[in-house]
Image (cartoon, coloured by chain):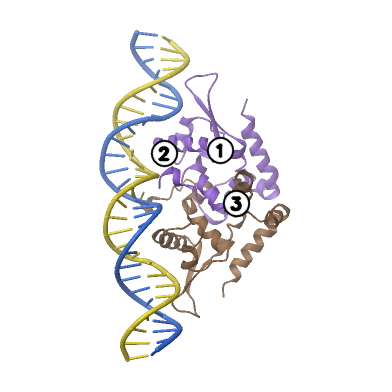
Chain colours: A purple, B brown, C yellow, D blue
Amino acid sequence: MPRENKLRNTGCPIAFALDTFGDRWSLVIIRDMLIKGFQTYGEFLEGDENISTNILADRLQELEALGIISKQRDPDNGRRVLYRLTEKGADLAPIMLEIICWSRKYDGNTKVQDRIVERIEKDRHGFAAELKKRALDTDK
Amino acid sequence: MPRENKLRNTGCPIAFALDTFGDRWSLVIIRDMLIKGFQTYGEFLEGDENISTNILADRLQELEALGIISKQRDPDNGRRVLYRLTEKGADLAPIMLEIICWSRKYDGNTKVQDRIVERIEKDRHGFAAELKKRALDTDK
DNA sequence: TGTTATTGCTTGTCATTTACAAGTAGTGAG
DNA sequence: CTCACTACTTGTAAATGACAAGCAATAACA
């Protein structure tokens, strides 16, 4: 399906969200930024899941076009590009946390630190806000 | 990518979840079951998003293999097959609700009834539990 | 009991996307 | 002014997706 016909525009929030990040890689990149604090192409590339370089480049461009992330040359090192979450991107934190809980319940292989889980169960909202703040504070 | 190599198995809950429902259609089907109460192939097929019949058949089989849904012939009408969410599937309700909130915030075209949004904001947990219960109670 | 309609699929074809490998371009450091 | 680092682009073969058509089992009806 060509990219420009990708949008379903049915008014359904689930369809809209899937048109935005409904693929195998977008949320992995967003996780890298939101949870792991990654900011560069190289960091994404060396993540545990071994994303292909062309797919990574494509997704970064797409996520930027969708307003989920922004890019900027590193002022301190001109050959480095810094990717950061926008507010729209950082607001995916609550979804991310619910996904973590679900996977932990149903995947024996999933590893999540106990303190993370406790934190989510005790105060999802506050934890999401903290992740969002941290992601946005790397801005200048 | 061949289906059997699809699993990343990195221990990351986000990657696990995406390996389960990280595509353009799986969550749409689950939404149909969880929110709209759809149960049959024909209902899914006639949904607003116009899913292709081969993709639908493939996803239903995959979701069943993953333990997200179960299928059974309708005892009252032998040419009909009833698809239902398992507990694993119904437990996706909290994720679904967070997605609804996010899309409503960022997609001007998204239509969600005000009472739904109020219900989510007021008591996410209780609302998710209600959706789950309703989905599982269609069982016999 | 034979015909027709309903329901849930399968098959075929072509376009698009993915994974993997290799190569290129701009920047900075020595 | 060469060399390495960082962020990409390009090429290719295989897998997946969308669209259209057809098939099979069950049930309703004559």
Q: Nearer the viewer, residue B9 or B65?
A: B65
Q: Are marks 2 and 1 in contact (CB under 8 Å)?
A: no
Q: Amino acid at mark 3?
A: Cys
Between label 2 and label 1, give the one nearer the viewer: 1
Q: Earlier in the sequence, mark 2 or mark 1?
A: 2
Q: CA distance from mark 2 to mark 1?
A: 17 Å
Element assignment for label 3: helix
Instruction: Give the crowd class for mark 2: few <14, some 14-19, many >=20 residues within 10 Å.
Output: few
- The residue at the point 57 percent across, 72 percent down is B139
| Residue assigned mark 2 | A55
Give the chain of mark 2: A
Instruction: Give the crowd class for mark 1: few <14, some 14-19, many >=20 residues within 10 Å.
Output: many
- Give above or below for B62 relative to B7: below
Q: Nearer the viewer, residue A90 or D10?
A: D10
| Residue assigned mark 1 | A68
Q: Nearer the viewer, residue B9 or B96?
A: B96
In the rendered image, residue A21, in percent from the top left (x then y), is placed at 51, 45
Q: Amino acid at mark 1?
A: Ile
- The residue at the point 58 percent across, 51 percent down is A13
